Image (spheres, rainbow, N blue to C red):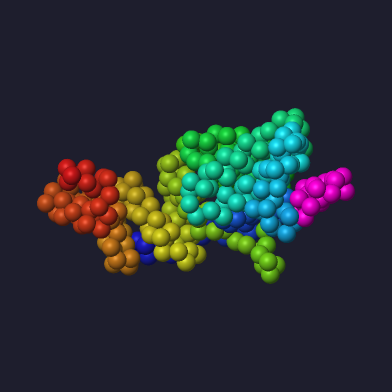
Amino acid sequence: MTHSYSRSAYGVQLHWKQTLYTAVVAVLIVSIASLGFVFLKDWKKKLGNEKQELAQLWEAAAYDKAFAVSGEMLVLKPMDHFLLTVRGFAAYQLAIAQINSGDTQTYIDTCIWSLRKALLLKNGGEDGRLQYVLGKAYYYKGFGYADLSVKFLEEARRAAYAAPDIPEYLGLAYASLQDYRNSVASFTLALNPLEIEQPESEDGEVIYPSDLLFLAIARSYIELDELETAHAYLVRCIEISKDSKRVLAAQLLIGEILKKRGDIKGAEEQYNKILKENGESAEAHYQLGEIYVAQDPTKARAEWRKAVRIDPSHKQARLRLNM
């Protein structure tokens, strides 16, 4: 953290958001299973025995079996909308459960292929559920697919599909496209209970904004050069987070804001405070070197060497040392 920030200063900028309930927690395993349950329940009365058995596999959360069985059935019925939808939903569930990124991408590709084909068969889908899953699948596919993530998530929203995490994923995808104004608008919607349903935990308690959400929206405000607002979100992130890595990320961004404001002394104090509170931080040492370079190049190089010692892959510090 940096200088002592008073609650009143924070309240001036963020008071109206403190009392709001949120609709978003940044998690990997989200509401696909529940939407799939509703989807299959609607279909169940219309299905033959084989498809009813497939629906039962989904309801039992046997996603690996549902994935395999739907794949076998698609060999004989490659244009079956129901089978394609089940395979796409199951592939997404399996993707987000993987540890190996290569396996994740294999399932994500299958999810996208299946649901895109299902959408074509239904001429755009019915109520936004398929677009919703596709939008999130494209987000997990990577940076280069952020435009498609936005496309399908916006389609889901226009279809009035009520998934509480759509605004957060839209905010992240827009940020990947460097469209920070729409990113901020989406993140703000994620914080606004008047626009979307308030999520609850299993015990019925309302879920409040996550530290990741505050961190993400602060980054977008920094890119828009709205530093006071960004600062307020970072302070809030630090206050609520129990994750030391996220706290460190917020503290480093506060140092960046201080530098952007021209408060070099404050930035120096911030980075030294990070080192005191968090132990070794390659980035904090690197930023101290950037502060010292104009006045004391020797001292700056000492800081960059410390950064490389902590993180030998720190690119900027290595470049400064001509390594």
| Image quarter in which the C terminus is found | top left
Residue 98 position, x and y percent, is: 53, 53
Q: Does the magenta stretch include residue 45?
A: yes
Q: Is residue 52 magenta?
A: yes
Residue nearest the observer in this picture, 160 or 43:
43
As drawn, which residue projects farthest toward the bottom?
203
Residue 204 position, x and y percent, is: 70, 67
Residue numbers of the magenta segment: 37-56
Residue nearest the observer in this picture, 32 or 201:
32
As drawn, which residue projects farthest toward the right?
45
| Image quarter in which the N terminus is found | bottom left
The answer to which image quadrant residue 75 occupies is top right
173 vs 43, left or right, is: left
Majority SS type along the magenta span? helix
| Residue in the image at 66% along x and 64% along y | 201
| Residue in the image at 64% along x and 53% along y | 64
Q: Is residue 246 visible?
A: yes
| Residue in the image at 57% along x and 43% along y | 108
65 vs 273, left or right, is: right
Residue 157 position, x and y percent, is: 68, 40
Residue nearest the observer in this picture, 249 or 232:
249
